[in-house]
Image: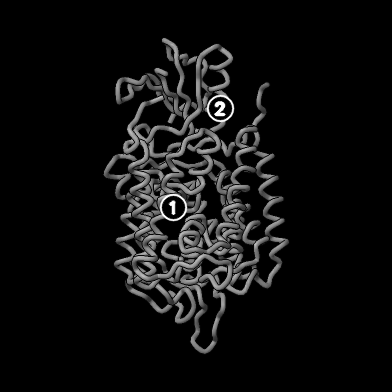
Amino acid sequence: MNFVATFHTHLAAMLTCSTLQKAGVTAKLAPVPRRLSSSCGTCVFYGGDEPHLEAMDRDVEAVYRREGEGYACLYRGED
Amino acid sequence: MEKESFFKRYGLLIITGVVVGAAAVLLTKFGNPANMGFCIACFLRDIAGALNFQRAGFDAEVGTGIVQYIRPEIIGLVLGATLLAVIRKEFRPKGGSSPMVRFIIAVFVMIGALVFLGCPLRMVIRIGGGDLNAVVGLVGFVIGILIGIVFLKRGFSLRRAYHQSMAEGLAFPVLMVALLVLAIVGPSFIISSVSGPGSQHAPLLLALIVAAVVGVLAQRSRLCMVGGIRDAVLFKDFRLISAFIAIIVTVMVGNLLVGNGLSFSFVDQPIAHNEALWNLLGMVLVGWGSVLLGGCPLRQLILAGEGNTDSAVTVTGFVVGAAVAHNFGLASSATGIGTGPVALAVIGGFVVLAVISVANMAKMEG
């Protein structure tokens, strides 16, 4: 899966995962990678060729594209 | 998902678990009560006592209770986390995610912990010491976590936190520094027990440094007793639970190596009782409440050290909960549950958590 979205709440991650899956995108809930955050929230890993920003819940924190071992930030929500 | 080597995936957490276990054994060897190298609930309760918020077992002749002492471990854990968070630019003041609701949950989590006699970390350390009552506690803890997960899956949320000022984020770590000054100076209004568990402690500097190392590792690894079981159930992710297991194994081996003792039984375990129903129900309250809070008491200390003021409010709730537990006779002792309305408090706690769980559920589509 090429993308990962982090959220301010577990609920926002769940809702986004569900929206992505309904749109036919492969998506999975997981703990946020330590590299992205020191918090212990829930993130969504998802596939496809585009980041589907329109599917994000309003409590999205950031969206990243996976690049090798790292992540490139594509979008950052309100802090 | 990412293909990672075993060491990359589990290494830091297993190392953290081993260090926490070894630290617990070491602190017990150097004076902390048995099977209580670390106990966030007990230590916050002792701090509440040092500040005279409670004086359980007060002896008029000596003028102190039995659980009153500024535990440097709490200070070290928080400041260790603060130090690493600042160095790694992860100190981010934030808060505003239902702080009052978190405070109330925290009060009941502490009451549950003191009915059982320990936070989840001490539960794990007690299991490592052979205390089978803690296995009963673990069953309750898992049940509580599963109840919390049901509500998480149905849309429970305390809503998001927002960025806050540096002054707000630093308030709690600064409070810890103030507490450290009081512990070092030892003014007469700060109380230190001369008998009971509060009088048993490792030297201040040793406890502070060992806890700071654990604080650093816990910040880096996101160690969490609740998170371990929650992630295993929710995501089939076993990283956090690997630390949980590493602590148990290390404490067992460590106790044997240094001669702290290791005997598998329900009776005569140190600072523990064998009323199974209350060991179980106390930890159900802790597990359920901790899932709603998003982490165990240790994790709340670490998050507060990183500038999370919701966690700082939660820790304040733990301190108040400890005072309530002792002032109303809800806290257990080695002889059994307290003399106060324990059933009312624990069942009342379930009702409060149920109301909070339902009242904070978002409407989920389909």
Residue type (three-letter) at the residue carrying disc 2: Met
Which type of secondary structure does the marked residue at label 1 adopt?
helix
Give the side of residue B309 with respect to residue B88, left or right. right
**Between B214 and B140, the one nearer to me in the picture:** B140
**In the rendered image of this protein, does residue B31 appear above or below residue B354?**
below
**Residue denoted by label 2:** A14
Residues packed near mark 2 inside 10 Å, few (<14), some (14 to 19) or many (20 plus): many
Q: Is B307 placed above or below B237 here?
A: below
Colour theme:
one colour
Amino acid type at circle 1 is Leu
Q: SS at mark 2? A: helix
Residue at the extreme bottom: B61
Instruction: Specify whether A8 is left or right of B18.
Output: right
Q: Position of residue A12 (x, y in %)?
A: 54, 28
Tell me which residue sits at (33%, 42%) in the image: B11
Question: Disc 1 designates what residue?
Answer: B301
Q: Residue B66: percent from the left, percent from the top?
A: 51, 77
Label 2 marks a residue whose chain is: A
Up/down of A24 relative to B151, above or below = above
- Closer to the camera in the image, B166 or B157: B157
Residue A70: where, in percent of width, then height? 30, 25
